[in-house]
Amino acid sequence: MTQLKRLEAESIFIIREVAAEFDNPVMLYSIGKDSSVLMHLARKAFHPGGMPFPLMHIDTTWKFREMIEFRDRMAREIGFKLIVHTNEEGLAAGVSPFTHGSKYTDIMKTEALKAALSKHRFDAAFGGARRDEEKSRAKERVFSFRDAQHRWDPKNQRPELWNLYNGRIHQGDSIRVFPLSNWTELDVWLYIHKENIPVVPLYFAKPRPVVDRDGMLIMVDDDRMPLRDGEKPTMETVRFRSLGCYPLSGALRSNADSLTTIIEEMLVTRTSERQSRAIDFDQAAAMEKRKREGYF
Amino acid sequence: MAAVKLKDFLRRHEAKDLLRFITCGSVDDGKSTLIGRLLHDTHQILEDTLASVTSDSRKWGTTGDLVDLALLVDGLQAEREQGITIDVAYRYFDTELRKYIIADCPGHEQYTRNMATGASTVDLAVILVDAARGVQVQTRRHAYIVSLLGIRHVVVAVNKMDLVEYDERVFKAIHEECVALIGRLGVPDVRVVPVSALKGHNVVTRGEGMPWYKGQTLLELLDSIDISRDQDLADLRLPVQYVNRPDARFRGYAGTIAAGELAVGDPVLAVPSRRMSRIKSIVTFEGDLQRAAAPMAVTVTLEDEIDISRGDLIVHPDRSPSVSRSIDAHLIWMSDAPLLPGKQYEFKISHRYLRGTVERIHHRVDVNDLSEHAADELKLNEVGLCRIVLAEQAAFDTYATCRTTGALIVVDRLSHATAGAGMILTSAAPQGVQHDVSVFWQPTRVTHGQRANQKAQHPCILWFTGLSGAGKSTIANATEQALFLRGHHSYLLDGDNIRHGLNKDLDFSDAGRVENIRRIGEIAKLFVDAGLIVVTAFISPFRSDRRLVRDLVGADEFVEVFISTPIEVCEKRDVKGLYAKAREGKIRNFTGVSSPYEAPEAPEIEIDSSKFLVAECVDRVIRYLEAQGRLKN
């Protein structure tokens, strides 16, 4: 079996294991390419039935408009149950990526996620994170235990042997599950290409209005973005390597407008995909800290 | 890159095979540096990562002016501050031939559990030895754990050759010692390569310094070692992971094939539930298949509507795995709370959580020198050969034949933590019992022996005989209760009940009594054949009647239990007032009063109930059955 088929089979195993062992699982849907692959694998796992769990999107209200359109179209076409959760308190308080810096991510993403998981009493949540993305993720288990406060304790992880995942938890505790743990960014794109999986058009190069701010190309996706003195959006042919909230996602100048040209570009690129995410730069070991607090 | 070239690349990358390996070594062996070197020299390190490592080198680095490649892999903030790796981390890289997943494991003594975790999923182990220090205690420990986890390929990287001035004699001495040590442990494929991870010699490229070394570099070895024949078991093993019932029309069994292959039309057997059918279809998202093989994730449907559940193994009928409640396995203990024999745990085997205990620890293995020691507990990071007894039967293979169906984890019932990991050595049989380790299924006929094995008991008739009021019914009832509580399958034949139904046409004439006992004997025989332990309590005063029943079944299936309570005691008890009536002549032919009781000449068990409590009487019956090996486990 080729490595890609092996990865696929392993991911399907993990997804089925969760559906069999947990009372109330949910699949976190971030609308990005990893989420698209995860959903595709889940559909395969339960064919000819549908996915036996809902998908949940934590909507900060600052996602690219094209992401939301894509999300709603997928829900319609595939017919899965979609839960959309927003931190209404944070929204009412006007928390925005422009005014609240790193607190914005805490409030609108981390806190919102924790609140949504608690509200629906989900006991297992799938995420699309991969171990090759970032150093602290390289050490995380496939079944990653979280206490009732959703905290990850890197020094007290359950040993994980063979494919005998331990799904036993106390009420209130939960497991984050990462079926794509062993996939690399290249594997994800190759799989999308091979399986013809739909992804958000923002991954493909196209002229878009951007401003160059602090070394990052930020796309002006709507009129909520306050422009600084002298800043003027210009049309540039750009694409995104990783998607999140538009004010925090840096665009790449690129002409790659198809899957094959994206893969080709990646093979010659010498920077990692997380470089275009602003949240990593905030502090040393930022990701590990976030994860301890309950971020995906 | 031209479009054709890209397509070619995609095809090749997709077709690569996957090799997982573990790296074992201590903090000082330069393990992180070796991995960093592998990643760096295979051009896996992206510019921003390298830039961040170069800047980190100034802050944390331990290599002077050279970039500390170890920082590429030492991930967590806590361990960077301590300068050590504290957990298993996974790394990815690929060459033209293979995609690699590295499980990076720490070498300190207290982290044996992490090494076992990393080793459980890999095909190959790279063991680091510091050339300047030679084979250490921990090298032996690593080699043992690697062999315990069933890894068949070991590459010993003799690192820091630069520190011994690339001396060939140093390498040769370590080479010989390692081949002998690891070969003794039963690892079939051992290679040794001299490297300098810091300078980059013989890791990916040959480098200078060791012109005397004519063998392959570490990466060349990794690229060329054949792992395609590592799976021993050719027999089908499909553990049912998920029963897929999206609607009333479809019932599929989803799972990942652990070994062997299956095809549409194949006869299959589900164990331990022991239901038979044929494969009707193999369903996948891409369409139905005619055949499928390990390690594919599939969904199968069966010809018959039979009830199979998660945790059953779908196998070919004449290639069944072991089915037993007792298992001998090597356990690696991973919890701060020690393993205690007799304590209840959950054991997860092929998707099932089964309750059970470790009945005893045969011995503890000192992982440093492989010596065996008596032990009454296993502490964190200790290894021992243990007898596990489960509350239900499990289907499994030995770990050596199939890693997936031969492995288990131990889960603490209170904390739910993964407390241990086990590799099944054998199906254990209690002493004195000829235990059928591999129960073969005959599709045409279920034999008496198979039924008995399924119920983990040797069926028999416990024939209680004795005077009225001797205590037969009381002890027989209590015995059946005891058997039931121990999970055995039994049936109590009650005289009155049979007289009300099957035998209601019979009177109390001599002919009627004989026919009564004959029919009871025939029923008991059928129940014994069905695998049950039959308990009866009839006065049955005549030897000839009891012999009749004994002759109906096998001689070793008839256990005569003589309740020899003296008639004075029985008459004093006279719970039903029958003795009084008999003495008054109101009942004729009353055994012991007006009709003889022929005491057994050689009963298997004799109990005078006037001398013991009921529980003690029951205990004697149970102990007799155990001593005869009739009750497994």
Image (spheres, coloured by chain):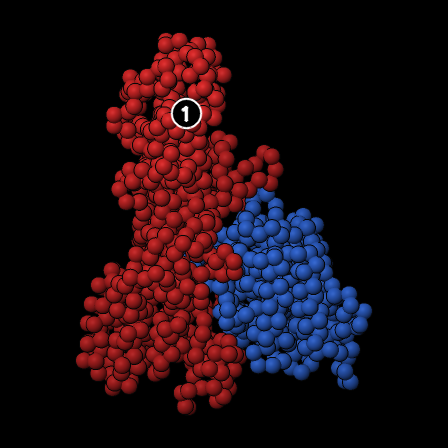
Chain colours: A blue, B red
Q: Residue at x 31, y 38 (%)?
A: B624
From the viewer's perspective, is residue B344 above or below residue B234? below
On the rendered structure, is B330 left or right of B174?
Answer: right
Q: Residue at x 63, y 80 (%)?
A: A282
Neighbor class of circle 1 (other Cα within 10 Å; few <14, some 14-19, many 20+) is some
From the viewer's perspective, is residue B267 above or below residue B23? above
From the viewer's perspective, is residue B595 above or below residue A50? above
Residue B425 shows in this picture: yes
Q: Position of residue A265 (x, y in %)?
A: 54, 69
Q: Which residue is mark 1?
A: B571
Q: Residue at x 22, y 75 (%)?
A: B174
Q: Quadrant of residue B366?
A: bottom left
Query: SS for tag 1?
Result: helix
What amino acid type is highlighted by mark number 1? Glu
Q: Position of residue B446 (x, y in %)?
A: 36, 29
Q: Quadrant of residue A95?
A: bottom right
Q: Nearer the viewer, residue B612 or B114?
A: B612
Residue B536 shows in this picture: no
Report the quarter where the C terminus of chain B lies. top left
* Furthest residue in direction bottom, as rendered: B65
Specify the subunit that label 1 lies on.
B
On the rendered structure, is B7 left or right of B457?
Answer: right
Q: Nearer the viewer, residue B269 or B393?
A: B393
